[in-house]
C-alpha cells in the first residue's frame, strides 16, 4: 500500500468513527488532526491521548481513553502494515 492510499484508508476510518454521537460528518477538522497524530506516534497509548485531546479541545467533552485506545490500535495497525509494504 502506498502512502497516499494509506492516508486515504486512515482518513476514512477516522471520519467514520463517531465517538461523541454527532454523526460522522461532524469531525472533519479533527480527522485531519488525528491523521497527523498517527504519523507522529508509533505507540497506542500516546496516540490515544492525542486523539482524546484533539476531540476534547474541539467539543469540550472527554472521550474515555479506552475508546481512544481502540481506534488508535486500529489506526496504527493500518499504518504498520502499510509501512511494511512500502519499504
Image: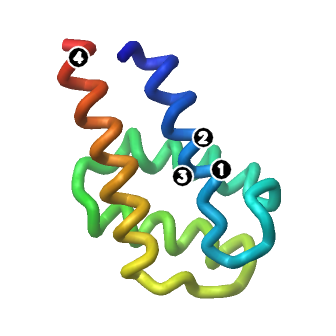
Q: Which mark is residue 85?
A: 4
For residue 55, what is the image quadrant? Answer: bottom right
- Which residue position holds label 2? 12
Which circle, 2 or 3, is nearer the viewer?
A: 2
Disc 3 on helix, strand or loop?
helix
The one of 87 and 57 positioned closer to us in this rendering: 87
Q: Tell which circle, 2 or 3, labels the residue nearer the N-terminal end.
A: 2
Q: Is label 2 in contact with label 4 (beta carbons under 8 Å)?
A: no
Q: Residues within 10 Å of mark 2 (few under 14, many from 20)?
A: few
In the picture, measured across the screen, residue 58 lies left or right of residue 44, that is right
Q: Tell me the CA gap for discs 1 and 2.
A: 5 Å
Residue that appears at 74% across and 58% down: 24
Placement of 79 over or under 34, stated as above or below: above
Give the tally of numbered discs: 4
Q: State the quadrant of the N terminus.
A: top left
Q: Tell me the CA gap for discs 1 and 4.
A: 24 Å
- Which residue position holds label 1? 15
Q: Tell which circle, 1 or 3, labels the residue nearer the N-terminal end.
A: 1
Amino acid at each position: 500500500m502506498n502512502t497516499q492510499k494509506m492516508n486515504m484508508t486512515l482518513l476514512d476510518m477516522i471520519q467514520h468513527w463517531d465517538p461523541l454521537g454527532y454523526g460522522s460528518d461532524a469531525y472533519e477538522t479533527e480527522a485531519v488532526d488525528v491523521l497527523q497524530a498517527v504519523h507522529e506516534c508509533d505507540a497506542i497509548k500516546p496516540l490515544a491521548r492525542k486523539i482524546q485531546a484533539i476531540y476534547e479541545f474541539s467539543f469540550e467533552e472527554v472521550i474515555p481513553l479506552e475508546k481512544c485506545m481502540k481506534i488508535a490500535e486500529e489506526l496504527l495497525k493500518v499504518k504498520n502494515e502499510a509501512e511494511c509494504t512500502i519499504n
